[in-house]
Image (spheres, rainbow, N blue to C red):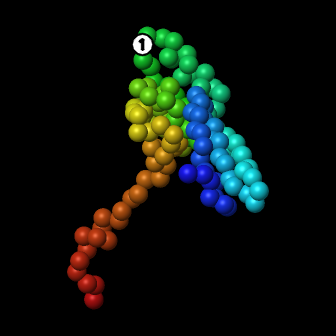
Amino acid sequence: MGAVKGKPLLVEKNPQPLGVILRLEEELGKGKNIVIVLFFVAVTRHLLAKIEKVNMKEEKEIIVTWSRASSILPAMVGHTIAIHNGKEHIPIYITNPMVGRKLGEFVPTRHFTSYESARKDTKSRR
């Protein structure tokens, strides 16, 4: 089945260590238009260097980072990364389902405080 006019068809998906290269074909009036799209994940260089350094060692250690916007790579699976929440570093163990998501998604930055006295006071005031 070929490409439908006006809708691109995914021809090839080539995963890379830091992203994905997609090859799309789109049928135009008299031929096909081939489009190559690159998707690269955002990871800071210093975090990538820390991951590579820990992967070389045999013992595991906690990696401390302030980079909440970095994406989780397959090389990070099995490591514990302490992610900054604005006040302190929260250690998070990285598993397979987390790959492709951002580090900041797993560490909340705000703490909800409910007002207990308002909820306990059920009597009406007169």
Callout 1: few (<14), some (14-19), or many (20+) C-alpha neighbours within 10 Å? few
Percent of width and height locating residue 74: 49, 29
Percent of width and height locating residue 83: 50, 36
Tell me the residue at 75%/52% (across/down): 31
Up/down of 114 relative to 76, above or below: below
Is residue 104 left or right of 111 when viewed as pictured?
A: right
Return the residue at label 1: 59
Up/down of 18 relative to 35, above or below: above
Tell me the residue at 30%/64% (across/down): 116
Farthest residue to the bottom: give it.
126
Is residue 76 left or right of 3 when viewed as pictured?
A: left
Tell me the residue at 69%/55% (across/down): 27
Q: Is residue 106 visible?
A: yes
Up/down of 69 relative to 117, above or below: above
Please tell me in which quadrant of the rendered image residue 49 appears.
top right
Tell me the residue at 50%/17% (across/down): 54
Camera-side residue of 125 and 29: 29
